[in-house]
Amino acid sequence: MTTTSDKNDILLKDVPYKFKASTPALLDNRSFIGGEWVGASDRSIFSVYDPEDNAKLCDVADLGREDARKALEAAQKAFVSYKTWTNRERRGLIRRWADQIKENKEDLAAICTMELGKPFTESLGTVKYGTDFLDWFEGDIERQYGETIPAAKGNNRIFTIRQPQGVVAAITPWNSPVAMVTRKVGAAIAAGNTVVLKPAPETPLCAIALAKLFDRSGGPPGVLNIVTSSVEKSPEIGEEFTQNEIVKHLSFTGSTAVGRHLHAEAARRFIKTSMELGGNAPFIVFGDAKLDSAAEGVIASKFRSSGQTCVCANRIFVHRSIADEFAKVLEEKMNSTFTFGSVWDKDVNFGPLYSEKAFTKIKAQIEDAETKGCKLISSSKANGNYGPNFYPPTIIKNASADMRFMQEETFGPLAFLVPFDTDEEVITMANKTNAGLASYFYTEDISRLWKVAEALESGMVGVRCGLISACEQPFGGIKESGVGREGGREALDEYTEIKSITVAL
């Protein structure tokens, strides 16, 4: 293809679609603005690739700043009427959207597997996680209460109400292209806002499919808009989002460096922001921990999605007295857990990294570890050719604080094991980072449990639990891991303004 098309199923002619779709028209290469499926105004396109073999999947509309402005204007026009919808009307819309996603879960999972390389079975879990958020927001919409406040002046009565903010500009990452959309967009729309969403250039197809299902659910034109763009054009979209007076809230998930820039630019206009940025999660195994349980926690936290999550364990501290034994238990768990092969095989549960760029970063950290005397232990079953971006789950023994991974988020399947001696020492090492998203630890000592949970500097802590993400949980970090919370009862609060009203009798 050289230009975008108006045919709903255009990509089926070009994409090596390895799954029999029940709804082929979900696969599209166009953006969605004001209820219309459109290409870029200059008809430019960019390519999307399959991480499993680096083969080109398709071309997608490459929108620029002018197109983003049109999308924001469409969202503002829609907000004028959408903000008058009752909570119950918005609740019905979210419910219908969630039901549409559930009915098409296998097609959505297939699209996720195509553009992200995530094993199909794991992609199904990602879609389920995404609908969990919509289910939660749908239930929370009618619990957005105000309050009455006792007034100091006897003739006054004070009460508060919550109102939507307006147009939300949202930017989502590539590593969870279904749930990251529903977590942001679902909350914003549930609260009465309209949204312009820019998905990651690596994974735009899931966002497009979700917009199609939103459209089928009766979503009014302009309430949800999708602006797809290449890596090269993404900065100009970000500029429009931060500089256009229409935007009242900017929500971003991605790297700390980009988040810092967007946050600073948004501050020039005092735009409300919610930022979910990078992590460098410590995972602590104390000497009294149950090793089987702790190893299972590492498997869940470190290797899920091939280590490509912002909350995955990045630095694994193990008490010196159990370091060798724990490495053996972890290796056994690793060898018994993972199945390798085609990501379309429903028994496979470990896939490639999302790109050559990610693979190169992993190799650099490995080389750094090897030059400093570390021992590498890879899964004994990962002995086949699983594609150019595949790297097996690997344990690195005897890692040290002077290695790259200590201050550089790995985002890959490398489990660095660092020995420690005292509680005070490991808490200091765990907190010695600018990131503060998630932390994990395993202990059977109830006193240590509370002390360490309170001492760790992160927005979320998993205690004897390696998988902490849930729709009912306020998700977010401190320090340079961002501001604001997504999920939980706090999610809709992020997208509303509190107005106080004083009435004199």
Image: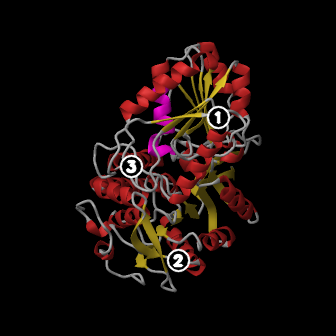
Q: Earlier in the sequence, mark 3 or mark 2?
A: 2
Q: Earlier in the sequence, mark 2 or mark 1?
A: 2
Residue 248 lies within the magenta run: no
Q: CA distance from mark 3 to mark 2?
A: 28 Å
> What amino acid type should be assigned to the residue bearing mark 3?
Thr
| Residue at 31% from the left image edge and 53% from the top image edge | 99
Depth order, front residue of 162/127? 127
Per the picture, the main secondary structure of the magenta-coloured stretch is helix
> What amino acid type should be assigned to the residue bearing mark 2?
Leu
- Which residue is farthest bottom? 42
| Residue 145 on image: x %, y % | 54, 45
Q: Which residues are magenta?
A: 295-307
Depth order, front residue of 300/339? 339
Local crowd size for mark 2, using a 10 Å CA cut-off: few (<14), some (14–19), many (≥20): many
Residue 302 lies within the magenta run: yes
> What amino acid type should be assigned to the residue bearing mark 1?
Gly
Q: Secondary structure at mark 3?
A: helix
Rendered image: mark on residue 63:
2
Residue 34 in view in this figure: no
For label 3, the residue is 131
Left or right of residue 233: residue 88: left
Q: Which quadrant of the view contains residue 177?
A: bottom left
Image coloring type = secondary structure
Residue 197 in view in this figure: yes
